[in-house]
Amino acid sequence: MTRKAVSPAVPPAPANSATLVNVAAAASVSLATASRVFSNPELVRQDTAERVLRAAGELGFRPNLLGAKLRAQRTRIIGVMLPTLENAVFAECWRGIEEAALAQGYSLMLVTSRYDPDRERERIEYLLRHRVDGMVLTVADAARSAVLDQLDAEGVPYVLAYNQAASRGKRYSVSVDNRLSARAGVQTLIAAGHRRIAVVSGAFVASDRARQRHAGYQDAMRAHGLQPMPPLSMPAHTPTHTPAEIERIRLFVTAPRAPTALFCTNDMLAIGVMSILKRLGLAVPDDISVLGYDGIALGGLLEPPLTTVVQPNSEIGARALACLLARLDAALPGRAATLPRTTLLPHVLRAGATVAPPP
Amino acid sequence: MTRKAVSPAVPPAPANSATLVNVAAAASVSLATASRVFSNPELVRQDTAERVLRAAGELGFRPNLLGAKLRAQRTRIIGVMLPTLENAVFAECWRGIEEAALAQGYSLMLVTSRYDPDRERERIEYLLRHRVDGMVLTVADAARSAVLDQLDAEGVPYVLAYNQAASRGKRYSVSVDNRLSARAGVQTLIAAGHRRIAVVSGAFVASDRARQRHAGYQDAMRAHGLQPMPPLSMPAHTPTHTPAEIERIRLFVTAPRAPTALFCTNDMLAIGVMSILKRLGLAVPDDISVLGYDGIALGGLLEPPLTTVVQPNSEIGARALACLLARLDAALPGRAATLPRTTLLPHVLRAGATVAPPP
DNA sequence: TTGAAAGCGCTAACAA
DNA sequence: TTGTTAGCGCTTTCAA
């Protein structure tokens, strides 16, 4: 640690550490020049820059982003709000976001909301206090979200990830086409010969995506003249294996005219359901087929590997971030790029081994 | 959005939005008083405070943490570095950290290192530039870590999570006793009748925990007069199911005198290995037993549920954060609490159904 | 209990 | 190409 006091200028000098002022003094240039070496190097002569850099090195100078941010009125921090990281979908998404942000010199501040609107409000307020330049977020229900309304009112730029904004609305979003992809997934079930197909989902009220995927299921059923069945709506988005939960599933799959295939609105749910089915003595896919949604890596590592609708999770994150940065750029004077509002990324059907013809 | 300009003082007033100055003016108090209402309310008279609060509410004032941080020379931001969130261990840990931090009014900045020392250095530098007050981190190998040495040299307070610091060293850490808990786990395997037990691990060089757990395995074996077997060291910490990987495992478990039980140094690995065993036609636990380590929730949701050594993941995170905050407090004048360096949290053995007597 | 004033470290006009 | 200067929004002595 260099802790040597510099000689010239700086009279009483509380001089705590290596600041730009010290560096400038050590290099015998003005504060402004020293600053430019770091923010606009092309404005300063080569050898001057080198002197400054050398001085900075010797003093162990590390730019204090706080000063820069305060002055520049932009923090280059992006706030990220995701429901939870314990569902790998969002952990994968975070990877995409982090990668993209750091590559562009942006910093991140992450909060998780647990699908809870109250928490969402609180966390967003917290991000706002940090004066994040913008946000990437996944909310429980984009159509009726207090936080999005607030953000809109305050003019804070944000991009939704996973939530699929209305195609003619004003909101930016990056997602797959939930309805269409779910429909495609269910169609493979129908193609395999299933007629009695049911949806297993987390709480619909807490997830617009679950509802959209359910709609896709209905589309597929109706398109084939099949009767949609009542869904099994679980309290949480990830399974818990409580006796009550197990019993509900037992009743659901052993009733007369029970479904021969289950479409689970996310992979974690599908994985949990499959293990419960196994405990109940039902073999997947021989006795009952299971289709997931999300495409988390884990699904492919199980045996049998989960058949599922794959979203490009880390790409959703990266693209959402890129879209946000583009918006921020566009807000700068001179730029006027019109960005597409809703980005729909392609989904893929992963053929695992959890779907077979009905018994 | 209130955008009204205030009348008195503030001559040319670029007046962009609701700042403390505006609030103070609107409440007819000085800037200092207005500030105190938010940071030291006990120093200001009740009714004055109320006037300020009312003005703040009307103007839609939101404290700019940047200004506060810059001036106060502490950011109340804690940097967090974890290897990845795609292993649920760390996602669960993050939950504990986030909960604890927000409860104490601290903010977080998360980066992930992918077990890569180069990335570790880069990410740490980034956190340092943000002037985080301290860090909670999990490094690949605490004993030989360039970043920890750097942090020590610079006097940045940090607390390790999962990495178990040497008990008489100077570093703070929160973890379970990796060696002892691994030993206890392997002992259950021995108690079940196994004699040929092998370790399956991620790259040892990249994880001190994997090495410690391996040492615990050796302890258990030797304590029972058994010969430790050579471990199967996988390139990554989570499985990938490439053909080469599957083939290595096949050779490992079908060789003459192959192990009858596998101790995997983390749960993700255990889960991946089990599915590969299944594909190879081996039944768990009838043909071969599997013991995991970590206790991620997912393990209990599989069928058969994974038998594993459970760490209190979210508590590790919460305690690491609490320990860090205590250190920060201790650094303040007047405090002199001596904190324990290494916190060892108790582990639990979760009896799943992946361990049975050898065939 | 309140106010006046001096910065925290940096950037960005503007001038030289 | 470089320097001078005025703050960004806030906290915190010191005095009143």
Image (cartoon, coloured by chain):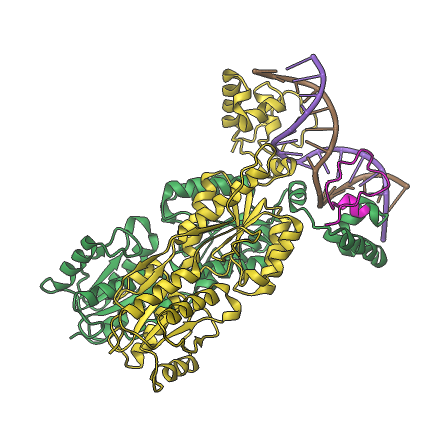
Chain colours: A yellow, B green, C purple, D brown
On screen, residue A334 versus residue B352, left or right, reads right
The residue sitting at 57% across, 49% down in the picture is: B77
* Residue A28 percent coordinates (x, y): 59, 18
B90 vs B1, nearest the viewer = B1
Residue in the image at 67% along x and 45% along y? B68
Q: Which residue lies furthest to the left in this view?
A: B256
Q: Name the quadrant containing residue A13.
A: top right
In the picture, residue A265 is in which quadrant?
Answer: bottom left
The number of discs equals 0
Tell whether B60 sits left or right of B204.
right
Which residue: 78% across, 43% down? B21
Q: What stretch is highlighted in magenta?
A: B1-24
Foreground: A278 or A50?
Answer: A278
Q: In this view, does A223 lie above or below A112?
A: below
Judge whether residue B3 is colored magenta: yes
Instruction: Point out the image quarter for the C terminus of chain B.
Output: bottom left
Residue D15: x %, y % from top left: 86, 39
Q: In this view, does B320 lie above or below B307?
A: above
- The answer, for residue B256, to whether it is visible in the render is yes
- The foreground one among A158 and A98 is A158
Does residue B149 appear anywhere in the picture? no
Q: State the image coordinates of residue B89 (x, y, percent, origin top left).
A: 40, 60
Q: Does the magenta stretch include residue A172?
A: no
Which image quadrant is residue A233 in? Answer: bottom left
